């Protein structure tokens, strides 16, 4: 009986680990979608973005994002580090406006939720491949 319980527990653990690996989708490549930006001194605006992630090492990706609102177009660069198979954190910088901040990415299949925050404001995006 004890051996059966131990075997069942090991099988369940293996299935859970396999499920986590199956959910992990590489960030490599183009993603696009929309969301909002909220400057600390300004109105919230809807934004559309195209984002390219390029693997730099096993857990690090560079990020280049081109985003547009009804009033401006911006280009940001950055880098994210995989902290779990579905979560990434890092930093971004916009050279044109000299704005920097933190970026967090949560991947679920072929969709991702991106949040940005910094002294100049915050934003959120939903992207898909």
Image (cartoon, helix red, strand yellow):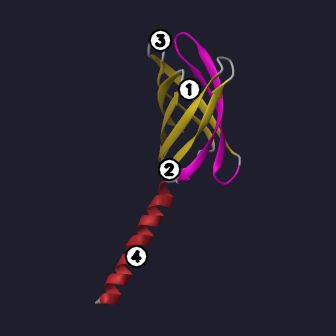
**Image location of residue 21, percent across then percent down:** 51, 60
Quarter-wise, where is residue 2 in the image?
A: bottom left
| Residue occupying the far front of the picture | 119
Q: Are marks 4 and 3 in contact (CB under 8 Å)?
A: no
**Image location of residue 112, percent across then percent down:** 48, 40
- Label for residue 49? 1
C-alpha span from label 2 to label 1:
21 Å
Q: Earlier in the sequence, mark 4 or mark 2?
A: 4
C-alpha span from label 4 to label 3:
54 Å
Of badges 1 and 3, the one in the foreground is 3
Of badges 4 and 2, the one in the foreground is 2
C-alpha span from label 1 to label 3:
20 Å
C-alpha span from label 2 to label 3:
32 Å
Which quadrant of the rendered structure holds the C terminus? top right
C-alpha span from label 4 to label 2:
23 Å
Residue 62 placement, left or right of 44? right
Q: Which residue is mark 4?
A: 11
Which quadrant of the rendered structure holds the N terminus? bottom left
Q: Which residue is mark 2?
A: 86
- Write the start and end of the magenta stretch as one range: 57-84
Is residue 78 visible to the viewer in this orientation of the structure? yes
Quarter-wise, where is residue 64 in the image?
A: top right
Q: Are marks 4 and 2 in contact (CB under 8 Å)?
A: no
């Amino acid at each position: 009986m004890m051996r059966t319980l131990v075997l069942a527990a090991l099988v369940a653990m293996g299935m859970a680990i396999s499920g986590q690996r199956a959910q992990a989708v590489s960030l490599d490549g183009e993603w696009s979608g929309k969301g909002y930006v909220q400057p600390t001194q300004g109105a919230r605006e809807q934004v559309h973005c195209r984002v390219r992630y390029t693997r730099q090492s096993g857990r690090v990706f560079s990020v280049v994002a081109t985003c547009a609102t009804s009033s401006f177009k911006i280009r940001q660069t950055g880098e994210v580090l995989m902290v779990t198979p579905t979560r990434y954190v890092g930093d971004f910088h916009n050279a044109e406006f000299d704005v920097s901040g933190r970026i967090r990415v949560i991947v679920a299949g072929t969709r991702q939720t991106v949040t940005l925050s910094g002294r100049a404001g915050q934003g959120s995006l939903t992207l898909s491949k």
